[in-house]
Amino acid sequence: MACFFQDLFNCNCKKCFEYFLNKMRNKIKFFERFLRIKVKFLKRFKKSF
């Protein structure tokens, strides 16, 4: 993280910033998928009652 902040202030390291963004995007995608599966499961669960 220190590298990330240093490069952000120096404004000379795009790769580090892009890498950080990609990591965040992957986490968000994974979380969205997880939520969708959960919602589908809950809907099915309610129907069964």
Image (cartoon, grey):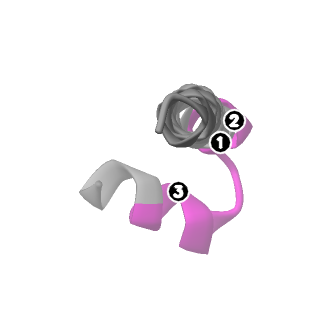
Q: Give the range drawn in magenta.
A: 5-17
The numbered dot on residue 7 is 3
> How far separated are the C-alphas under marks 1 and 2?
5 Å
Q: Is the magenta stretch mostly helix, strand or loop?
A: helix
Dot 2 lies on which element?
Answer: helix
Residue 13 lies, in percent from the top left, at: 64, 43
The numbered dot on residue 43 is none
Q: How crowded is mark 1: few (under 14 residues within 10 Å), some or many (20 or more)?
A: few
Outermost bottom residue: 9
Q: What residue type is labelled 1?
A: Leu
Residue 42 lies, in percent from the top left, at: 51, 40
User: Which quadrant of the figure contains the N terminus?
Assistant: bottom left
In depth, the one of 10 and 39 nearer the eye is 39
Dot 1 lies on which element?
Answer: helix
The numbered dot on residue 18 is 2
- Tell which tag, 1 or 2, sits nearer the viewer: 1
Outermost left residue: 2
Residue drawn at 65 percent across, 42 percent down: 21
Relative horizontal placement of residue 6, taking residue 14 as reference (left or right): left
Dot 3 lies on which element?
Answer: helix
Nearer-N-terminus badge (1/3): 3
Query: Would residue 45 be counted in the magenta stretch?
Result: no
Residue drawn at 47 percent across, 39 percent down: 49
Residues at circles 3 and 2 in contact by the CB criterion of under 8 Å: no
Residue drawn at 66 percent across, 36 percent down: 25
Residue 34 lies, in percent from the top left, at: 50, 30
Q: What residue type is labelled 3?
A: Asp
- Tell which tag, 3 or 2, sits nearer the viewer: 2
The numbered dot on residue 21 is 1
Residue 19 lies, in percent from the top left, at: 58, 30
> How far separated are the C-alphas under marks 3 and 2?
11 Å
